Image: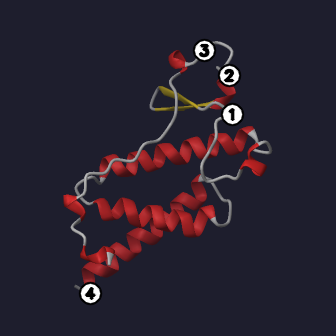
Amino acid sequence: MYSELDAKSLNFEPIYKYYKPSELVEKEYDSRNCVSIQNENFCTIRSQRIHDISKSNQNSLSQSDSLNILRENLRQKCIWNLHQSEPLIYWKYMIGFYDMCVKTKMFNEKCSNEVKYFIKTLHSYSKIYR
């Protein structure tokens, strides 16, 4: 059914929640909850609810888990920004990330790179056999 949709006719933009240090109240800011990418800092609030993680697991999230989720959110936002003209690349990544990383609880760069490699291989394969 979704193959019949014209992806360009949909008006969609993903929303990712992160903070700049200047947006945080002093008591919420902890530099250990921030990552720096291209000289820009992005932060998470450790107690922030994350929709993919159940409430029972929320309290057991470690700082590194929160940072890996923040990094992944930034990767996904970057993929969206780079491929808005080809939104199926973003959706293939999201489905691949869910299947390969979320289900195995591997929120890390290694898993993300495996998904990107898999999608790149699929994309090359589909160009050959069109």
Instruction: Please tell me whether mark 4 or mark 3 is closer to you in this view.
Output: 3
Residue annotated with mark 1: 46
Q: Residue 102, image x and y in percent? A: 61, 61
Q: Are marks 4 and 3 in contact (CB under 8 Å)?
A: no
Q: Are marks 3 and 1 in contact (CB under 8 Å)?
A: no
- In this rendering, the answer to whether 62 lies above or below 33 is below
Whole-Å distance between the Cαs marked 2 and 4? 51 Å
Regarding mark 4 in the picture, which secondary structure is present there? loop
Mark 4 residue type: Tyr
Residue shown at the point (33%, 81%) measured from the top left: 125
Lower sequence index among marks 1 and 2: 2
Whole-Å distance between the Cαs marked 4 and 1? 46 Å
Of the numbered discs in the image, which one, if any, rests on residue 25? 3
Residue shown at the point (56%, 70%) measured from the top left: 99
Mark 3 residue type: Val
Side of 113 where 120 appears, left or right:
left
Residue annotated with mark 4: 129
Lower sequence index among marks 3 and 1: 3
Regarding mark 2 in the picture, which secondary structure is present there? loop
Lower sequence index among marks 4 and 3: 3
Q: Tell me the quarter of the image containing the C terminus.
A: bottom left
Q: Residue 39, image x and y in percent? A: 46, 26
Instruction: Please tell me whether mark 4 or mark 1 is closer to you in this view.
Output: 1
Q: Are marks 1 and 2 in contact (CB under 8 Å)?
A: yes
Mark 1 residue type: Arg
Lower sequence index among marks 4 and 1: 1
Q: Residues within 10 Å of mark 2 (few under 14, many from 20)?
A: some
Residue annotated with mark 2: 30
Whole-Å distance between the Cαs marked 4 and 3? 54 Å
